[in-house]
Image (cartoon, helix red, strand yellow):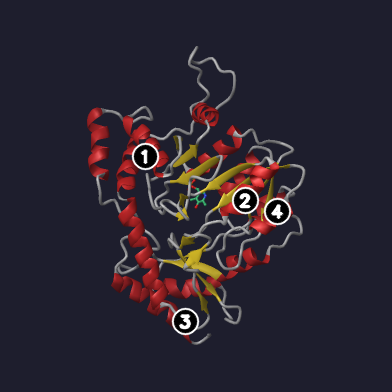
Amino acid sequence: MSDFIPVCTPVLDGNEQRYVTQCVETGWISSEGEFVRRLEDGMARHCARCHGIAVSSGTAALEAAMHALGIGPGDEVILPTFCIISCAGAVVRCGARPVVVDSLPDTWCMDPAAVQRALTAKTRALLAVHTYGLTVDMAPLVDLARREGLALIEDAAEAHGQSIGDAPCGSFGDISIFSFYPNKLVTTGEGGMLLTDSDALAQRLRELRNLCFQPERRFVHQTLGFNWRMSNVQAALGVAQLERLRPHRQKKRAIGQRYAELLADTPGLILPSPTGPGCTNDYWVFGVVLDDDIPLGAEDVMRRLGEAGIGTRPFFWPMHEQPVFLNMGFFAGESHPVAERLARRGFYIPNGLGITEDEQQRVARAVKEALRHVA
Ligand SMILES: *Cc1c(COP(=O)(O)O)cnc(C)c1O
């Protein structure tokens, strides 16, 4: 269908081509190139952090964070059940136990009171995940981590440029991470970033991402590392994207606010909250949730929208309902009703930076049409 509106397409309208060409012309395409350092410094400065460590994906960043913090067998890490598999996957891969908590019904982000209740003597770390454009209420988690001596990891993969009060997302964790996947607000195609103020953690992360080569004697290893390096070509895209973060973020917000107006008072439809704890919604995605009295699930409405040429994506599926984790013996018999409901009744609609006002109107009309006879 030629007039299909995809859920997201990246916009590369700054210096991307120029910087990538520079890599090709100079031959600096590996992870040793100068754009990697520039992207690391740029992200660190942006979030008022001391160190940036670029890696190959947001998922790699999460795994690197767990390894660098020494989390392993016998440890528990508390995280939201409503998030991407990368988060719980990173906990499981380092041999620790993921302990999941429900989301708040208004912001869809993890509930700090539930985190408090999930604490045990084995809790080693908290993993806070800013979700869909709103932020986790960080103040109680920062307090809790300090009081209990826990590591705090902040997943800001969906929160480039977002802040809580005056504090940038990416400034809260012992380690904070970002993703640069193409649907994120800064993209390198594939890529990720870790930020920290600790010299020791930064050094450990740099070793881990580069096979734990040692400066004294190359090819002699005391510990096993990984190849999580980012290439200079990817970083070149990222440097150009970071230059455009401010206008792109404004555009994203404007798209979200326009949908909020176009879809206001649609019977049967719950819209994302325009504000969260200390923040206004960035609308990283524009998620909608069907009212309980609508006799359709998200799948049905998404199918109808697909037939109308509108791309959609389902919401996250809760970690405590993932076959892979249930088969490993995690989460047996657990229930987290807010996340379960979001997963079954939520989906998001096209809000890529390239979307036009006309296209947004078409999307809004199609959403209303899909619900007309059922709401
Ligand atoms: C996208 C995303 C990730 C994973 O990033 P990749 O670069 O795709 O590996 C991790 N956490 C959150 C919250 C994300 O949205």
Task: Identify which amino acid the numbered label 1 is placed on.
Answer: Gly
To which residue does mark 4 refer? Answer: 116
To which residue does mark 1 refer? Answer: 42
Q: Residue at x 53, y 81 (%)?
A: 268
Q: Is any part of residue 125 visible from this angle?
A: no
Q: Nearer the viewer, mark 3 or mark 1?
A: 1
Check residue 180 in the rendering and tell me which mark sits there, or answer none: none
Task: Identify which amino acid the numbered label 3 is placed on.
Answer: Thr
Residue 188 at x, y = what percent?
A: 37, 44
In front of the other: 110 or 339: 110
Q: CA distance from mark 3 to mark 2?
A: 35 Å
Judged from this view, the residue extending furthest toward the bottom is 373
Q: Nearer the viewer, mark 2 or mark 1?
A: 2
Identify the image quadrant of the N terminus.
Answer: bottom left
Does mark 4 have its CB less than 8 Å from ligand 1?
no
Residue 117 at x, y = what percent?
A: 73, 55
Precedes in sequence: disc 4 or disc 1 = 1
Residue 16 at x, y = what percent?
A: 27, 44
Residue 121 at x, y = what percent?
A: 77, 43
Q: CA distance from mark 3 to mark 4?
A: 37 Å
Q: Of helix, strand and loop, which one carries label 3? A: loop
Precedes in sequence: disc 2 or disc 4 = 4
In the image, residue 371 above or below residue 316: below
Precedes in sequence: disc 3 or disc 4 = 4
Relative to residue 79, is residue 60 drawn left or right? left
Task: Identify which amino acid the numbered label 2 is placed on.
Answer: Leu
To which residue does mark 2 refer? Answer: 141
